[in-house]
Amino acid sequence: MLLVFDGKVGADGKPFVGVIKAEMQSGFQRRLAAAKIVTEFLENIFLTPATRLYKLALFISEDVAVTANTSWRCFVFDSNITAARRENAAVYFYDGFLGCAFPENGKYETAKFFDLTKEFVRTSINDRDLRRDLGDALFAFVKVDQAPTFTSQQFGEAYLPPELRDPFNRFLEAKKFPTDRAVVRDISEMGGRLRRRKYKFGPDIEFSASPDAIRNGTVTIEDVPPGDVSDSEAASWTRITVRRPVTEQL
């Protein structure tokens, strides 16, 4: 159920309009009828004390008297949003229904570019060596490059094969990432996503290392082709070389 309500807020009484996407529930109520306590089953009840609010929005007027030229500030809550992953918010709610968009800022857009590029590489490229090379390039492009701004075209032209550049731009545009302007490079909200590189080998083996260790050769990861093994196994395998002693086992 969609609930829409309005009122005034603040010392100056600025008008606001609120929107709640309320989840429907079922439950029981108890009432007294003809000296008896009657228990009734109710369907489609909402906003009970046990209800979680998953999606809501509040539009607050900038003016006390609303006119056609009044600006509104919008605050959106979505239970999927985290401090580091605002893009987890449901697009159908904040964009399709409310007509809102996230403010353009370097922290958000740098993280979004990083996550979208990883998704594109993972879902669009079958060649394992190319996927790994592009993963290394993405870390260097986002974290190591010292230019204050960047564009998606710069990454595509520097690292993607020519046949993947247009699909990459279309993918970003479909995800509402700006491809027609520069983005301020700001990794201050990306946390651990740039501190460790993680590699998976099937369902039961994982390996992680810092991007610096991969880049400076402290750790090397090599695919060994089929037949190049001492026990004559046919399947290809991976050789990981760590140029440091074991210091701890977790």
Image (cartoon, rainbow, N blue to C red):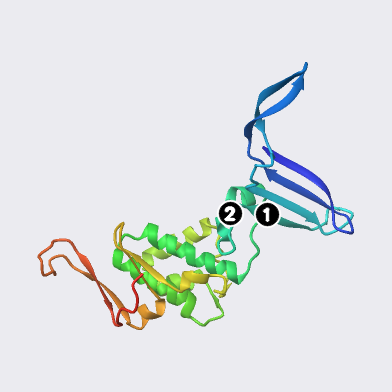
Could you tell me which quadrant the C terminus lies in? bottom left
Could you tell me which quadrant the N terminus lies in? top right
Q: What kind of element bears circle 2?
A: loop
Q: Nearer the viewer, residue 101 or 85?
A: 85
Q: What kind of element bears circle 1?
A: strand
Residue behind mark 2 = 89
Q: Tell me if label 1 and label 2 are in contact, CB under 8 Å.
A: yes
Question: Which residue is drawn at the image coordinates 76% and 22% (left, top)?
Answer: 32
Three-letter code, disc 2: Ala
Q: 108 left or right of 33?
A: left
Q: 71 left or right of 168?
A: right
Q: Is residue 2 visible?
A: yes
Q: 4 left or right of 14?
A: left
Question: Which residue is drawn at the image coordinates 69% and 28% (left, top)?
Answer: 29
Tell me, for residue 151, which label it has, or none.
none
**Distance between the Cα atoms at labels 1 and 2?**
9 Å
Question: Which residue is drawn at the image coordinates 35% and 76% (left, top)?
Answer: 248
Tell me, for residue 76, which label it has, or none.
1
Question: Which residue is drawn at the image coordinates 60% and 71% (left, top)?
Answer: 106
Give residue 236's position: percent from left, percent from top: 19, 64
